[in-house]
Amino acid sequence: MASSCVTCISAILDDLQLLEDLCPKTPDWENELCGLRRAKIFLGTFRPFLLSVRNWGDDDDANLGAWVARMKDYTSKLRQAIHEFYLTSVEDGYLTTFEEYITDDLGEEEYSLKLEFKDLDSSSRLSSKSPVKKNDLMDIMDSLLESLRYVCLIGFFEDLELWADLEEKLAFLKNFICFVTLHGIGDGQLGPLLTHTKSIAVNAARNYLLRGFRVFPLGENPVRDLLPKIIPVEPEVHRTCFQALIASKISRQPYEKKDEHIFKVFIDSLLIYLWEILKTGACVMMSLKDRLKMIYDGLRSLRMILKENPPDFDEKMRDLTGLLLCDAGLVMFSLSLNEIKDGSVKEMDLESFHDFLKRIKLIKAIVAEKYPETSPSSKFPRTNELGFIDFLLKYIGDLTNPDPHSVALSNYPIHAIHEELACLRSFLGRIVELRNEDQELQALWDRVVEVAYKAEFLIDSLLVGDILDSSSTSFDSVEEEIKIIKAAALNISDKKPLDLNVKEATKRPNNMPSQGSMPIINDMTVGLEDEAASIINRLTRGSSQLQIVPIVGMPGLGKTTLATKVYNNPLVTSHFYTCAWCTVSQVYHRKNLLLEILTCIHSKLPEKFSEMCEEDLAAEVRRGLLRTRYLIVLDDIWDAEAWKGLEASFPDNQNGSRVIVTSRKSDVATSRDKLDEGPHFLRPLTPDESWDLLNMKLFPGNDLPPPELCELQTKIVEMCQGLPLTIVIVAGILACEDQRGWKELVDGLSSRIVSSTEQCSAAIELSYKNLPENLKPCFLYFGAFPEDHEHTAEKLIWLWGAEGFTQKTQFKSAEDVANDFLMDLIQRSLVIVSKQRSIGGVKACRVHDLLHEFCVTKGKEENFLQLVRGYDEICNFRVPRNLRRLCINSKPEHFCKSRLFAPTIHSLIHSDGGKRHRYLGFEISPIFGIFKLVRVLELSNINLGTTFPRELELLVQLRYLAILGNMKSIPSSIANLLNLETFIVENDQNVLLLPATIWNLKKLRHLQIKNFMLPIHNLDTAAHLCDLNSISGVYFDSWETMRKVFIKIPNIHKLKCILADNEHNWFSADKILVLDFLSGLESLNLMFNPYGHLPNPCQFEFQFPLAIRKLALSNFRFPWSKISAIENLPNLEVLKLLRDAFDGVIWNMKKEGFPKVRFLEIFALNIVKWTADEDVDCFPSLQKLVLTSCSSLKEIPSCLGSSTLEIIEVSHCRFSASFIVPLQEEQMDSGNADLKILIS
């Protein structure tokens, strides 16, 4: 009876899958899909259990037999209900819900079945002595695994990780049995293993069924107790596994082509089991862990080979693979997982281990010979090779100075290698240009670079206490190789004349902008005026219904530029009450897009939104847009699915709301009823417009171009084919070259008769080729992040420094040099400024899609970096042997599940489209024991949980560390990271406590943590952090604490502090908090009592450093009389008076002050009248004034920045008209007719 019931359930599941496939994937049908999926899960929980009891007789369990009979009757009725639903809903197109076809009788019957099953006694099933048949067992396992994979895929259970773990461990048992039976091993030989597996499977099936009924108490799950029992540990079962593997190994029966699938799935299971050992084996000896890593690496390589399905994978290769898998299995079964967890592990099976290594080496050699195109690259990075050697020489030089590393290196020829490499570096500097036309010189160049990378690898491996490579490379061999290369170089020098005066490619070009150059956001738009007017007309006029306005055009044509121009137009901003911008891109997550829109709707996004599911977020977006006239921009949509996922969130309020969509395709917005007109197809620029744009980029402010450019006008215009991006890139190339070489550059590009997109790609390639060598890695680094990623300039500069792209000079810090590099890339039109700082400079930047794709492709080609996107790419990624940087764009759970093995990488960067998983913690500590060489670890999108991973102390090479977590403290072992320069923690706890050992990190330059405390115990004896340049988020509870800390950071430049709300702790004897001893401090942000409102204004005051350029204050409630401490600061350029910084309805300026302030922001103050005495020239240098949420403000001085004021932004100020009109008239009378005033 159970068998017929299983057959009926299987048929129903097929019907449900058909219905799910036929249902439209639209928001209207979302609830319907959920109902069908719930039904699939409910029935899927029954099938594995019924399979496990299908061979029972009537005497086995009468109660169970009766329950199965009722189940069969129920499934028959359910199938009839599904058939009726199909006829009505799908064939007739009538939208209904599946639950409507579940009658009351069926619903009650389902509930009754659940209750009866909970009371069933299944003990007889577990104690059955009937022999287990492999085929019957595989049916149970297949059904159970299929159901588990489905619930894991759609995330149906709350305790999803447990069920995913169960699925992996059950798959291991199944795949092991399938593998060892390939050679004819029968059921009788596997008796104990089959019995063990049947017992586990039946228990799992029963628990799975009970979980489907949701009968487990909250926080309890019997599966948690079942998991440790799955991998065989009982002596008899363990012995059976060993004997099966040995029998397979000695069998002479050949493997067949169809067996390759079993190989693949068994390798996957072995990798998961190995990862579990590596993850839990904190007590395993280092030599044993190294061997396990070698096996893991070998198995992963073999999996990649098999997944590519080589056409000539013959019998010999299959037999080698089968033997190798037997060896791997024997090694792992010689280790008990429980013994590893207890720290009592014994040695592994060394004979099988060495057999494994020999066979994997042979397989790799055969594959490399037969299929060289499928073999992973073993070349070293080719980007800025001289820059790398310079970095290495400095790195080795620092190591040979007295420090903790010196003892570890004293027995190795490090000093000799340093001297010889320095000599070869000098030689390379002489052949920079000559090598391009001389194969012998190029070959020697490549040998020097290769041996330099080998030397670095050996030194790094020694310092981390790990030998990561089984090759014969050693310090002696490297030293000998360097000597041979040096002799060859001397021989070449004797027989060939080398130009000693050749200029090295790494030197900074003469026309490179200085640090003081201030880029502006590119608003040079040519030929878009008529296009913008047309779009604005469609937005502000026409139907009151919700309308879509698609802007369509090829890449680089200016779709985003046009949308931005329209979005920021005053006619548009004043017409719509709510505006939101959302960048979609080719790879996107619907949840991230909804959060991006909500961020625009709400001035401050509530934290609860981050933890909502997609449907709840979609409802929140819809709720936020109801009853308001809104404009939404969906930029860079690639397919209609993205639009369908968002469409339901945009209500039609019948008030003229609009949605702008930019895309390369015209059919992405498929709601024809919301298209009053067709798409707006963006045209290319005309020849005259192209010429104007080129001139504006090359010679801003000049009316006439030079004769050299006029002669090339026709060629350039024809070459660019009206594509703005190509024009901008060509302008960037020409701007950085001598005008005498312009003709040669243009001739080279214009000789290619290709499409406009190909021409743009050619221009990008030429621009990259002409970059100075030291700028190339900085540019390619943009490929480490997702498309359309907005980079914080500050963080990008820190990353470049940690990577070794920038080095400090005699007169500039590494950050200043990096800023120069960024400015140069901007000048060359390779990088776009997306956000400016208050007084100019770059706050955020990005690159165009085509430039990003170039960086990804070129980075991979030069083995500089690899960007891996999505779960499928991660799982199928073959790690190049000498990969330097691994960049992963995926969901955190996919990153964790991938179990990547790339021990040679120096940088690991994870991103998830800007989304941060703040509350769901992930266990990724095993990677810290694998990626020991990393210098850059960017994990600020993956929550590491409530405890700082102690395994991080192994990463002694770290220079940049960014993590996310809910931890309350940092362990003292952070002191092991002696090379750490940048430490970023995204933390949601109230206050994060740092250990006293933080003062040992002498190289620390940037400390950015949300709300943390620095230790002050025994601070008098602690070291000074003289290199510390910036601190953000530090919390102080008293002036005494603050003073002691500041003494220890004498060279701080940028400081953001939170002062505790206990006011009496801030009173010094004279009530003045003296900060002027911080002579280098330029940027200061002070926040008092951020979590409450002061009952009384603060009575103390500050004595600020005279060098300060940027100052932000909030929550002090100072009386306006204390503004005198600020108004005479001679170098102050940016002043932000934020929420309750000052208290009082009248601010009267009685004397001139703020001589250099160019930017002033006033936010959420209770001020009503802001006046100035007659003849007082207040803020004489003011260029920008921002007034926000000053709801009572009615008057401001009309003489503000009388001759310098450029823009005023006013938002959420009720009485703005009362003070803006007089100010505008005063400015007009003073001749300032260009003043911009933006009110919202």
Image (cartoon, helix red, strand yellow):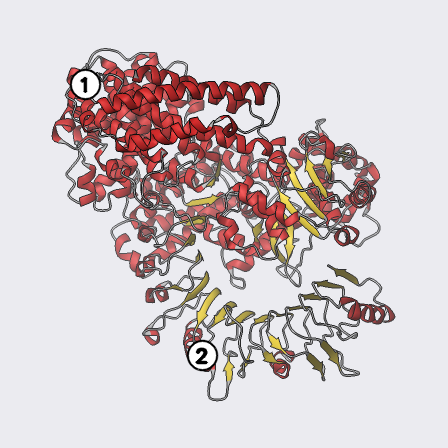
- Asked if 55 appears above or below 553 in the picture, the reply is above
Q: In screen coordinates, is 441 left or right of 1212?
A: left
Name the image quarter holding the N terminus: top left
Q: Amino acid at mark 1?
A: Asp
Residue lying farthest to the left in this orientation:
235
The answer to which quarter of the image holds residue 130 is top left
The answer to which quarter of the image holds residue 298 is top left
Q: Which mark is residue 584?
A: none
- From the top left corner, tell me how far across and down residue 1011 is, in percent: 45, 64
Identify which residue, 1107 or 667, lies in the foreground. Answer: 667
- Asked if 723 appears above or below 1204 in the picture, the reply is above
Residue on which disc 1 sits: 59
> Which element is circle 1 on?
loop
N-term-proximal mark, 1 vs 2: 1
Residue on which disc 2 sits: 1039
Pointers 1 and 2 in contact (C-beta within 8 Å):
no
Identify which residue, 652 or 705, lies in the foreground. Answer: 652
Residue lying farthest to the bottom in this orientation:
1070
- From the top left corner, tell me how far across and down residue 936 is, in percent: 43, 49
- Nearer mark to the viewer, of 1 and 2: 1
Residue 297, can we see it? no
Q: Residue at x 57, y 71 (%)?
A: 1114
Give the class, few, some or many, for how many residues have Cα within 10 Å of label 1's Cα (few <14, many ≥20).
Answer: few
Identify which residue, 955 or 71, lies in the foreground. Answer: 71
